[in-house]
Image (tube, grey):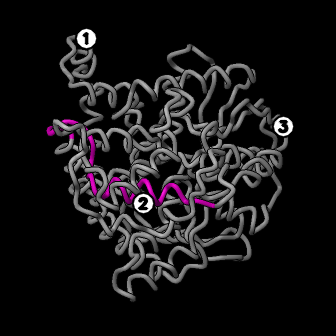
Amino acid sequence: MVTQTGAVPAAAPIPRLLIPELDKCIQCGFCLPHCPTYRLLGVETESPRGRIHLIEAAAQGRIPIDRRFEEHMYVCLGCRACETACPAGVRFGTIIEAARAEIGPTGSAPARRMTLLALRHLLPHPGRLRAGARLLRLYQRSGAGRLARALHLLPRRLAAMDALLPPIPDRLFAPAQEVFPAIGPRRARVGLLSGCVMSILFAGVHEATIRVLQRNGCEVVVPRGQTCCGALNVHNGEREAARAMARRNIDAFLGAGVDAVVINAAGCGAASKEYPILFRGGAARDAERAARYAALCRDVTEFLDELGLRGPLGEVRARVTYQDPCHLAHGQHIRRQPRELLRAIPGVELVEMEGADRCCGSAGIYNLVQPHYARQLLEEKVTAVARTGAAVLVAPNPGCMLQLAAGVRAHGLRMEVCHLVDLLDRAYAAHAAP
């Protein structure tokens, strides 16, 4: 709102937003060409530098947190490509998440309520998630989904979600046993973070991860007390439930006595490694335990690289291209390890795509709340993928796999979208086959 004199009305300062990361930005602009929304829109307010300026102004009370401020914060994908480009080491992800914590979820009032319902009452409860998945599977197989799409009965956000979802598998990840023994001499005892989306839509990836870890001499623990990592909550300004979920995971894995917490979803890994930020300024015990937990967290490719991949591997003949998930490449600085693991598989021909570390447009639930921009980024990505002539697209993150599979289907490409551990698992199985 603007007064009759044209002045912006005064707003209350927000000391919580004056976080240390704000002071690091030197306003050099190196981030601009790496920011997807700046590339699409070409305006300063949709760049990391511009958003930092807005957040600093809101923190000092020079501008209000209103709908325009909210729009600038949520047009951002949170992909963190700016962090890789930044010469000053600005952690933009921390900054944008702090701003969104002052706003809460974006969208219309009904959309906000639906998002909060999912973040607070669905994601933290694995049993409810599995029950919801079974209902969704019934919806898909009964023909109700086709009818709803044909008659345009679904609200815009639900329709976008429906278009992205693959068929809900018959098998969800809810193992009867908690401990899976190592194959051969034990080299490590590790925990597996099962998460939310991975357990529902990619149970096979979790199972492949366990088999690969076992073959590499790991005793694998899947603690029953764990829950969703809270990444989607943090990305969407809902920190209260995220802290509760973090405490559950910290208790579950520290209590399991593991050497590492292995994570096969890039977004979950980045969020887990940043649990100490969630508890910044809180109780000292929470901060100490969060730091201990974060120090244990490893992406599965990072862990296998550190451990040293144990062979022998059978041949998997395939031309493969690799998509860098944003929260793996930019959030965790893991690029070399996945590629080296792929090159270690006999028969795999790795072909790099142009802009492999550019965001595909998934970005948590960005493709649901900003579908127009997400589609443009997906088009750019699928064009680059198609040029490689690959038969397999590897993308070790659930949001990326869903988004890229939707793009591959829409373009009629004959291409498999899978996780890296799927190929490793096939290589081990190929060697074991008679």
Q: Going from the N terminus, do you reach mark 1 or mark 3 first?
A: 1
Q: Is residue 224 left or right of residue 304?
A: left
Task: Identify which residue, 151 or 214, lies in the foreground.
Answer: 151
Relative depth, front residue between 271 and 419: 271
Q: Residue at x 51, y 40 (%)?
A: 47
In the picture shown, does residue 276 fall above or below 407?
A: below
**Secondary structure found at label 3:** loop
Pointer 3 residue: 347
Secondary structure of residue under mark 1: helix
**Disc 1 to disc 3, how far (Cα)?**
44 Å
Q: Report the Cα–Cα distance between label 2 and label 1.
A: 37 Å
Q: Where does label 1 land, which residue?
A: 150
Closest to the camera, between mark 1 and mark 3, is 1
Say which quarter of the image contains residue 215.
bottom right
- Say which residue label 2 marks: 175
Percent x, y of residue 303: 68, 65
